[in-house]
Image (cartoon, rainbow, N blue to C red):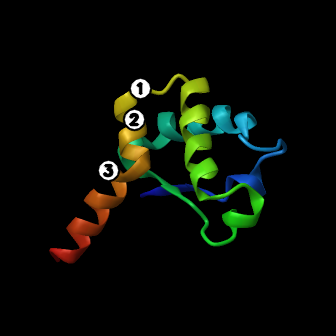
Amino acid sequence: MYVKFSALFRVSREKHPYLDLSTLLSQIVSSFGANCVMWGSDFPFVVPECGYKEAKEAVNLIANKASLSPTDLEWIMGKTATQLFQSHSAS
């Protein structure tokens, strides 16, 4: 099972950088493991909300507040998706 951490502006009760989601991200990683979590930008809908770059930076700030390791963040920000889609293309 994989979890997409996406559309933060729709889920958060706060404005950018959506730091109230740090507890949620911590719980997701604890439950599923960072290697099963992937960030989704929610492009193009994120552009008028805060912008792509700012949305990506928000995940870094949220992960930092959640005390996730750099390795966990690496999985969330691309390694999980790479692993998932490579395994599907090899099938």
Asked if the residue at tag 2 contacts the one at tag 1, i.e. Cβ–Cβ closer than 8 Å, the answer is yes
Res 26 visible: no
Tell me how far mark 3 sits from mark 1, CA to CA: 14 Å
Residue reaching furthest to the left: 90
In the displayed structure, does residue 27 sit left or right of residue 14? left
Name which residue lies at 59% across and 39% down: 25
Q: Amino acid at mark 1?
A: Ser
Count of picture labels: 3
Q: Which mark is residue 69?
A: 1
Quarter of the rendering occupied by the N terminus: bottom left
Question: What SS does tag 3 mark?
Answer: helix
Which residue is denoted by mark 3 in the rendering? 79
Using the image, determine if residue 87 lies above or below residue 58: below
In the displayed structure, does residue 68 sit left or right of residue 79? right
Name which residue lies at 55% across and 49% down: 56
Front-most of residues 15 and 75: 15
Which residue is denoted by mark 2 in the rendering? 72
Residue 65 horizontal/vertical position (percent): 61, 25
